[in-house]
Image: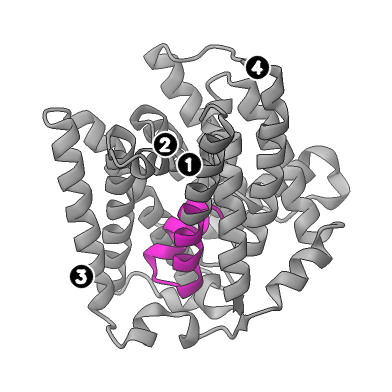
Amino acid sequence: MNLASLLEAWGDAHVLAAGGALIGLVFGFMAQRSRFCARAAVLECCDGQPGDRFSVWWLALGAAFAGTQLLVLAGALEPSKSRFIANPGSVSGAVLGGLLFGAGMILTRGCASRLLILSANGNLRALLSGLVFAVTVQASMSGWLAPVRQFFYSLWPVDGGPLRDLQVISGTAPWGGSVVALAALATGVYFFWRQHNGRPWLALGAVATGLCIAAGWGFTQAVANQSFEPVALTSLSFSGPSAEWLMRVLSSASVPGFGFDAGLLPATFIGSFIGAVLAGDFKFEGFKTENKLGHYLTGAILMGFGAVLAGGCTVGAGMSGGAIFAVTAWLTLISIWAGAAVALRVHKRMGWAV
């Protein structure tokens, strides 16, 4: 049965949800087994000792970029139709939101996707932080934080279209993105080989984690090409979907539409849970010290507001948006790292454990 037949039999929404679930299952399992974590990568980089986590994160990033750009060159993906490029954006939102998200990531000891993965491993701290993150995302989208978010967003808006496409602005299309993607992948391979020579399964986990980004883009593009209805071109993201699932749980009257994101989030949780059980990593963990509770909750609020302001998290904006070379996505990724680096420096000056 081909994709057109599936769409006719099940409908766009259910096919998109099923595809999101399959990709999320792989992402959750592979990210758990490879210990994929942006926060840990930042810590190693800022300490001047790029190690295990940095090499895994960079290899995953390179795989995401290379896989996505391969789809673009093959004519299987049109980035100009994605929200990162087609819709209006904000430079101020990307920079400020990224800085806040990065700082929050240090405080909560994980980004949005990492909190979800750790929650599935029995980490109650991550579960609580994830819930606060989802509540803040919803408040920033349509609640009492929305006016604040709109104010900062409006400081430096940018129109949708070519002005949001880094390759168009730099005049390097269509090959510029591929060159950068291959360079990123080569850099990831170099760091990984230096740290993990002789551990092919870990490399497979990191590459598969990154390729899930490309799979998301390719799948939603394929559905959009076959469907008679408008289909949002998207890939992995964990900020908006967190708020959507929160509303599904709290109120049946305000359930968002079913689609790719609806399948992605729970399947990522399940995939991580399976990985933890098979590896013997599953165990319930609480808060190690009570005075850290304020750090976790503050960080979750900063991440939630920052993610909505910036248009995504480390995976949603930084990797998914970065892989199609959206200007604001790159600004978000750079700002997340900068915000995390500053927060880490403050942490150390205050004598707080990281």
Q: Quadrant of residue 246?
A: top right
Could you tell whether 155 is left or right of 206 in the image?
right
- Nearer to us: label 3 or label 1: 3
Q: Amino acid at mark 3?
A: Val
The residue that label 1 is drawn on is 24
Q: Residue 188 location in percent, x, y?
A: 23, 49
Could you tell whether 294 is left or right of 226 in the image?
right
- Element assignment for label 2: helix
Q: Is residue 315 magenta?
A: yes
Q: Amino acid at mark 2?
A: Ala
Q: Quadrant of residue 80?
A: bottom left
Residue at x 31% of width, y 60% of height: 65
The residue that label 4 is drawn on is 289
- Element assignment for label 3: helix
Q: What is the distance, in whole Å, between disc 3 and disc 4 at their CAs?
A: 47 Å
- Nearer to us: label 2 or label 3: 2
Q: Which span is picked out in magenta?
A: 312-337
Q: Which mark, by number, is residue 40?
A: 2
Q: Residue 76 location in percent, x, y?
A: 33, 69
Residue at x 65% of width, y 18% of height: 287
Q: What is the distance, in whole Å, between disc 2 and disc 4 at their CAs?
A: 20 Å
Instruction: Please tell me which of labels 2 and 1 falls first in the chain.
Output: 1
- Element assignment for label 1: helix
Task: Work out whether residue 279 or residue 344 is closer to the camera in this orientation and state it.
Answer: 344
Q: What is the distance, in whole Å, between disc 3 and disc 1 at their CAs?
A: 28 Å
Task: Work out whether residue 46 or residue 122 is closer to the camera in this orientation and state it.
Answer: 46
Q: Is residue 64 magenta?
A: no
Q: Amino acid at mark 4?
A: Thr
Q: Residues within 10 Å of mark 2 (few under 14, many from 20)?
A: many
- Nearer to us: label 4 or label 1: 4
Residue at x 46% of width, y 74% of height: 327
Q: Residue 237 location in percent, x, y?
A: 54, 52
